[in-house]
Amino acid sequence: MQQCNRGQGPLYQLYEGFLALRPLFSSDSSPRQRVGCLAEFVGHSVPVCRVAFLRLDSAQKPAEAAFWGESQEDSAVEEMVRDILGGQTPPYSPTLLPIEREGALLGFLYLGKARERGPWTEGERAALGSLADILSLFFVQQGRMDDIRLQSFIFGALMDSLEANIYITDPQTDRILYMNRTMKEAFSLKEPEGAICWQVLQSGQEGRCKFCPVQLLLQDPSDNPSCVWEEHNSRTGRTYQNYDSLVQWVDGSRVHLQQSLDITERKALFQAASIDELTGVRNRRSGKKALVQSVWAAQRAALPLVVGFYDVNSLKQINDQYGHLEGDRALQLTARAVTSQLDSADYAFRLSGDEFCLVFWNSDEAAARTKIEAAKAALSALAEENGLPYQPDFCYGLVQVPLDEGLGADELLARADEQMYRQKRLLHIQRAEERAAVGETDESVEAFTYDKDRLYDALVQSTDDYVYVCNMKTGTFRYPPAMVEEFDLPCEVVKNAAAVWGSRIHPHDKQAFLESNQEIEDGRTSCHNIEYRAKNRRGEWVWMRCRGHVERDEQGEPVLFAGTIANLGRKNKIDHVTGLLNKFVFEEDVNHFLQERPDQSLSVMVLGLDEFKRVNDLYDRVFGDEVLRITSQKIQTFLPSNATVYRLDGDEFGVIFSGGGRAAPEQFYSALRDVFSRQQEFSGRRYYCTLSAGSAFYPDDGNNYLDLFKYASYSLEHAKARGKNQLVPFSPSILLSKERSLDLIEHLRTSVERDFEGFSLAFQPQVDAMTGALRGAEVLARWQCADYGPVGPGEFIPLLEESGLIHPVGRWIFASAIRTCSRWVERLPDFSLSINLSYLQLSQPDFLPFARQTLLDMGVDPAHIVLELTESYIASSADAMSQTFEEIRKMGIRLAMDDFGTGYSSLNILKRAPADIVKIDRDFVKGIQNSRFDATFIRFIVALCHDVGIHVCLEGVETQEEYQIVRPMGLDTIQGFYFARPMAQQDFERWAALGRQQPGN
């Protein structure tokens, strides 16, 4: 039998040296080391003198190249390729092998054999074919490594850019596989990867934490188990909200992912923002919000609910006689006595100074009254226990909430207030009788006499304020001569004062003025204290402070109302909050400069705090005043010698620069902006308010105060509209834009009054990402103005919001869209319609009942409807609006997060937001042909959303090239011009009738 010679043949020799190829697959090897390893390996079986390889990436571009050879002259890969493609005859026999895998070209292998060793043999070519197969494995591995490195880079970059703490562990060993930079910094860790999580993230742990959710997640049979929980960390001492889940890691294994948000400050801020500091009950904002929710819940569950209103008696007298600290103590003891009698489901909140609201859950009026009477007895005991020199008490009113009337919170409070006033009226009568009884026996009072007829004249002459008196029986007022002259009143005695004086009140202040007067007339209060603006005889708006007191007769009826009106514009020049000169001086100084130095330049700047309302809402107005004071100090710190700063209205400040040209405001603002671009802190509370500014220049922009101030204010509005935190100098285009906006608002108002004339709806299809089949549409509002023609939604929607017209227009859009949808779903049972909502619409408590009734009236299943809200609104309101979002979803309506990726992009948002659909913004589609980051970002978001059951729609696909790139990314739906532009209803119906859509038509 003939033996086989195993040592012969190049193919066998190739396999014999296979172990020498280990460096080829090592990630630590350089390209030169790899090609050297390859040459040594091939050299065992084939006499080569030149070896080179070229690896291509997924775009068929060179990703890696290396060579090995005997001389440097032909060392370049390009020269070797020219040799094989027909250059000069080289001193060796070249061959070029394509490296392929599953039909895809991965690169090339180039080899040279010395000519004296003869031509390439069949055995050698077979060996080289096997080598090409081996090399293809290496190329595939390297390609995957490139993708992994890119994905790891993007993953790491994304994770490090987030403010959330993120780490990944092996759920079996608890070893940390990854941790982002934010968490490393929070826990002061440098390289925690490889460490055991409970050893480095907790203190004093000897094993896996008892509260760790990993074991529960492992036991969960669902594909992607997740949970949300709160943790007080023993290492940092801070409180976190954790989002844990099991996800697939890059190597295919299942890992534990935790996203952790530091909510320490948020919890403290929420507590501070929700609780009245003096009494410990809820404040007005959180209390009214809770009341709305309680009424809704009681109506839904058909449970009885009682709303109460109580008012502390004689608080002003306590303050006047014993001081405000004692008055505060009276409020505190009353609140303590009342809350001590409430059940766990009941609650109280403070409406204003001495007024409080009570909510009794699952209770009738009799039970609620029993609790309040017990509270009055408890208050009497507390007063005696604390040795008070007076007896605190309160009046109250109760109203049983009618479940079938759909009353709002304000109406219920008004009814309870009315019931309370009846009790308060009896108290006034009782006290009047007591005063009358005292008057009959008080000889010291009777012994004192004076000339009452001359009293009024004496008071008028003794003060700069305007002294007024009113006969409450006739409604006739008497005003002093100085006030008659300053405000051009018809005479000193005015019979119809509400109409005469009311006509001079600023429109923005008239409502508060009338409400305060109505409280006096109704007998709800005996004191009057209000500030407002009134127009003097020169047509100037002047700030006034009006104070007064009501005297009542034996029956408790008001008979005399008297007090003083202070002309703040004439009397006060200093703002009491900031210590700055006020707006009246600001106006005087600008006018004085223009009159005295008309040949010199002057710059007028108006500064405004951005998002200042949030500071007031988050804390309170007392803290807001401190922020204004601190802001004024910082402005003064950077103020140049040729400038003066003033406090204007609200959160605005005025600055006058004498000389310095246009550069003066820009240099000043540049230094100031840096200070306000960082988070600030006062009294242990953090806040963030950037500063926007507008400026106008004399003489170029205007030659009088009104124009300069108006133009600087317009420029400030423009700066805020352009993104805030910037200075915008005035330009004629701003004035044109403002005039256009004001004119457009009037046209919009006319359109609404004419049954929404000029408004129409357009529909843009949403198609299946893979098949192009119609799945739904987005409703887009359009408006044709009679004078300006078609106006884009980017312009008219903000004007609707600014003017308040968004509410009627938004309802028209919703009802019209539902009416259209009712017809379409008959032919397309799986069709869904997306409707954009303004955040202002959701702020109206009656919008959701309207939406529910509209769907019911038109017979549309809510499952066909998607409400779209912007990512920034959902992110900023996820906590505050959680109840509203939950109610929407309970109705069966889905929520979509629009423009994802443009504002608050964060994995945390996807975790805690109530979105059923994420719409990725078109910014990630533009230029996707040249951006691997955008493509990887889209894939990453799609995978993450699908992992938690969120549907993904991609907006803005406009070309075939873009569609071919995004089509295999796993998206659910696509929306864009490539498939169809927004169309009128009839055009959409014709388009949809084509069946499966042909893109690009």
Image: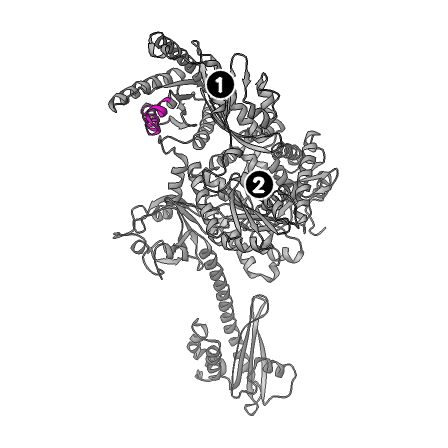
Residue 71 rendering spot, x and y as whole percentages = 53, 88
Task: Say whether residue 158 is left or right of residue 91.
Answer: left
Residue 616 part of the magenta segment: no
Residue 279 rendering spot, x and y as whole percentages = 35, 30
Q: Which residue was labeled with disc 2?
A: 587
Q: Give the Cα separation between the discs numbered 1 and 2.
A: 35 Å
Q: Is 606 in front, or is 96?
A: 606
Other residues around mark 1 within 10 Å, as few (<14) / some (14–19) / many (≥20): some
**Which dot marks residue 456?**
1
**Which dot marks residue 196?**
none
Magenta stretch: dominant secondary structure: helix
Circle count: 2
Where does the N terminus fall, quadrant-wise?
bottom left
Does label 1 or label 2 sit earlier along the sequence? 1
| Residues drawn in magenta | 317-338
Amino acid type for the residue under numbered disc 2 = Glu
Question: What residue is rendered at 36% in x and 24% in y?
Answer: 320
Q: Is residue 782 above or below residue 178?
A: above
Q: Is residue 309 above or below residue 38?
A: above
